[in-house]
Image (spheres, rainbow, N blue to C red):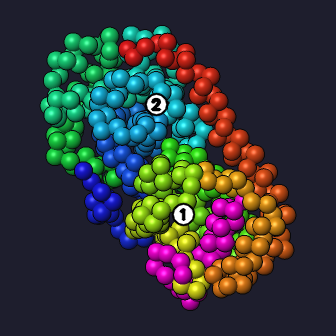
């Protein structure tokens, strides 16, 4: 199975995140820390769908990229599950839970919201799909077929028996979609490229030609941060508050527009590595022992590995250095003030404020006086930026008030999704698996 190092091969240093390829590379590396099998399955399905749509010659490049992204992320709801070793078996047993959650996740947390119904219905057999009103019926049929093809090939050690799909046409699969696949395979050699692994290069080439705007980049990365909920709800809220506090401090201290943008992305991505940390450590109700603390601390190194070679070094270092201290007592590198830029120092302060202000599995939120005492003490002892702490103290009430306003929106949306899931899942379970 591939690891972060495998995914780094062929990625140019500092390629940035302006293209869909750069954003997807971060998604790929991060989600691979949770379950590489689900990532691999999504990429196979995405590739098959992309070639089917390319053959039809009716879609723009942007449309094909968006449909491919939907296909690659179609099982994002599955990352909530622990220890899925065989995606193919799981797909046939537990159908609606990950489909419904994935639908809600894509609808509200990505730029693909208007395409989310494709994911919702991708496990519905063709004979039932025909009874459902969907804006993207054809794409859903293609995704459902591609999904079942990879599941079948996984169960048959990579072999493809076309007769199985032909015998189930008009019942489990769309005749039009199956005929389209056969034509696309004849022209592009889909099965051959899946067999030799070259399909990954084709995916990268497709995504690399598509530029994302700032809103789309932020939306995809916000989505990735919310996937940390699959490990720890506290960590999601902590990340969002760290971003908010860092941005407010940065604006108050008149950072340049470039530094503010780097501050945003660095704070947003600073805890991605926690997706690789076991839940029992992330959510431990008590003090961690030395061994578990070492595992917890590894999240900063993992975050650096995920971001290295994709985002600008300035963003990577803001994210990876948020536990360094000005006096050299931090981790992982024991850097000192001369090594740390001011944006890095701001995020370190914002991270501490977020941890103190927020509720965790092992503590309640601290009151304002205690928070201020801890931050002042760290500044007095030369551990964190005096300038940033002084600015925070002068504006503490306003900063907290502004955060609580934004929290009502971000956390409100997050909780609304959980509520919607509980409301609609019974109806889909009643449909059965096929």
In this rendering, the answer to whether 203 lies above or below 57 is below
Which residue is rendered at x = 29% and y = 30% of the image? Answer: 88
Judge left or right: residue 429 versus residue 387. Answer: left
Which residue is rendered at x = 43% and y = 14% of the image? Answer: 432
**Which stretch did the figure color magenta?**
329-357
Instruction: Determine if the magenta segment contains residue 343.
Output: yes
Judge left or right: residue 37 versus residue 132. Answer: left
Residue 342 position in % (x across, y down): 63, 80
Label 2 neighbour load within 10 Å: few <14, some 14-19, many 20+: many
Q: Earlier in the sequence, mark 2 or mark 1?
A: 2
State which quadrant residue 10 falls in: bottom left
Mark drawn on residue 270: 1
Label 2 close to label 1 by CB (< 8 Å):
no
Instruction: Determine if the magenta segment contains residue 292.
Output: no
Mark drawn on residue 57: none
In this rendering, the answer to whether 428 lies above or below 391 is above
Read off the residue under disc 2: 98
Q: Is residue 334 visible?
A: yes
Residue 360 position in % (x across, y down): 63, 53
Judge left or right: residue 197 versus residue 287. Answer: left
Outermost residue to the bottom: 338
Residue 217 position in % (x across, y down): 54, 54
- The number of discs equals 2
* Main secondary structure found in the magenta portion: helix
Which residue is rendered at x = 59% and y = 75% of the image? Answer: 344
């Amino acid at each position: 199975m591939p690891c972060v190092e495998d995914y780094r091969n062929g990625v140019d240093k500092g390629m940035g995140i302006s293209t869909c390829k750069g954003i997807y590379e971060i998604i790929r590396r991060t989600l691979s820390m949770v379950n590489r099998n689900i990532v691999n399955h999504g990429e196979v399905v995405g590739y098959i769908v992309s070639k089917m749509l390319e053959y039809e010659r009716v879609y723009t490049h942007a449309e094909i990229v968006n449909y491919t992204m939907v296909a690659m992320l179609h099982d994002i709801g599955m990352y909530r599950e622990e220890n899925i070793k065989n995606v193919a078996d799981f797909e046939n047993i537990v159908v609606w839970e990950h489909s419904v959650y994935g639908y809600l996740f894509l609808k509200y947390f990505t730029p693909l919201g208007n395409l989310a119904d494709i994911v919702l219905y991708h496990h519905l057999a063709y004979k039932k799909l025909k009874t459902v009103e969907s804006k993207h019926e054809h794409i859903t049929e293609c995704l459902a077929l591609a999904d079942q093809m990879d599941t079948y090939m996984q169960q048959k050690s990579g072999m493809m028996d076309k007769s199985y799909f032909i015998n189930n046409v008009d019942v489990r699969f769309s005749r039009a979609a199956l005929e389209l696949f056969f034509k696309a395979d004849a022209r592009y050699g889909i099965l051959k490229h899946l067999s030799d692994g070259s399909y990954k290069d084709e995916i990268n080439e497709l995504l690399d030609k598509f530029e994302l705007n700032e809103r789309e980049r932020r939306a995809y990365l916000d989505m990735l941060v919310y996937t940390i909920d699959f490990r720890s709800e506290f960590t999601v809220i902590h990340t969002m508050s760290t971003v908010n506090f860092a941005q407010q401090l940065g604006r108050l201290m008149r950072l340049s527009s470039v530094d503010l943008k780097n501050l945003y992305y660095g704070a947003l991505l600073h805890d991605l590595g926690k997706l690789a940390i076991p839940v029992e450590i992330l959510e431990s109700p008590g003090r961690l022992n030395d061994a578990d603390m070492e595992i917890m601390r590894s999240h900063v190194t993992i975050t650096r590995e995920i971001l290295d070679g994709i985002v600008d070094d300035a963003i990577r270092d803001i994210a990876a250095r948020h536990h360094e201290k000005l006096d050299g007592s931090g981790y992982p590198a024991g850097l000192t003030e001369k090594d740390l830029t001011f944006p890095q120092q701001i995020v370190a302060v914002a991270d501490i404020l977020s941890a103190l202000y927020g509720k965790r599995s092992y503590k309640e939120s601290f009151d304002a006086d205690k928070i201020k005492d801890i931050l002042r003490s760290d500044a007095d002892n030369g551990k964190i930026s005096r300038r940033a702490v002084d600015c925070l103290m002068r504006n503490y009430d306003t900063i907290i008030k502004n955060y609580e306003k934004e929290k009502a929106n971000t956390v409100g949306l997050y909780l609304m999704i959980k509520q919607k899931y509980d409301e609609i899942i019974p109806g889909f379970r009643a449909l059965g698996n096929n």
